Image (cartoon, helix red, strand yellow):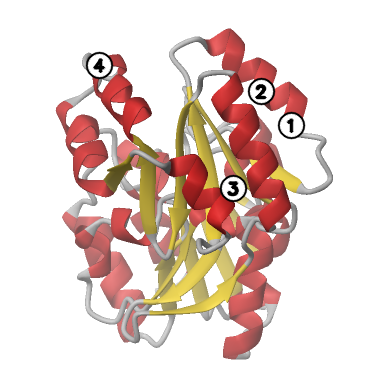
Amino acid sequence: MEREIKLVALDLDGTTFNSEKVITERTRKAIAAAIKKGVIVMPATGRQKTGLPESFTSIPGVRYALTSNGGAVVDLWEDSIIYADFIPYKTACRVIDHLIQIDALIEFYHDGKSYADRKSYNRALHVYKNFPDWFKEYIKVSRIPVDDLRERVYSGKFNIEKMLASFDDMILRQQLFDEMHNDPELSVVFGNSFNVEITAATANKGHSLLKLAEKLGIMPEQIMVCGDTMNDRTMFEAAGLAVAMGNADEEIKAMADDVTLSNDEDGVAAAIEKWVL
């Protein structure tokens, strides 16, 4: 029986992006063709709304985005939040105090924007000095440095989608993860090779994806997802068709219904061409 896919959710880094952080023309064309066929195609990322790549959002028909690891699902056309799962106030206060105590590089996402502690921001630019130019530029343009990050959390005026702690000491990073990943009030994942990403306990890509699908009248079995790391695990559990990239973690490949080519071989395009077009 042929699958009827109505919604495609795509992780960005390591999945839709190649290693040069480019969405290739073949991938853009495949996304556009799926949309023209009536399929909803959307990014599903740990990035905040202002960190979404124009190379994806400018494709005609891209309307929705799952951001902040599920902390917020947004309607890009209406500039509105469809579904949000914010970190509870008391929990956010507890987390920010702990992150300050361990001297992490700290930021949080609110209303699609990233607010970074100014000292952390300045230190990060030094820590990341040997990183690729695209990454340093992304940090500069997507973060708002502030002097009063803790005060902003404690004010209660900020709905916090996600909190991040980055490290130049990977032992401290692992220690934080070990301390927090069993916290019943939090969902804690590794977003990349040097950070820890923290959301509300029920905020994850899979849960938020299903919330959007429910609103749109789409069944789980009509959803296809593509991803590469354990940060995509909940999407793989939620969707009817889970496609792992050729470069994906082995744990993700083991969960997948299909394994496509790598992100440097237009794996997302190949998956869309195989299962949607």
- Mark identifier at residue 180: 1
- Mark identifier at residue 126: 4
Mark 1 vs 4, N-terminal side:
4
Q: CA distance from mark 1 to mark 2?
A: 6 Å
Label 4 element class? helix
Find residue 269 and report its horizontal and vertical position in percent.
Answer: 34, 57
Query: Which residue lies at the image location 50% right of the left edge and 9% below the top edge?
Result: 169
Q: CA distance from mark 1 to mark 4?
A: 27 Å
- Mark identifier at residue 176: 2
Quarter of the rendering containing residue 18: top left
Q: Is residue 263 visible?
A: yes
Label 3 element class? helix
Q: Choose mark 3 or mark 4, whichever is in front.
A: 4
Three-letter amino acid code of the residue under disc 4: His
- Residue count near mark 1 (Cα–Cα under 10 Å), binned few <14, some 14–19, many ≥20: some
| Residue corresponding to mark 3 | 232
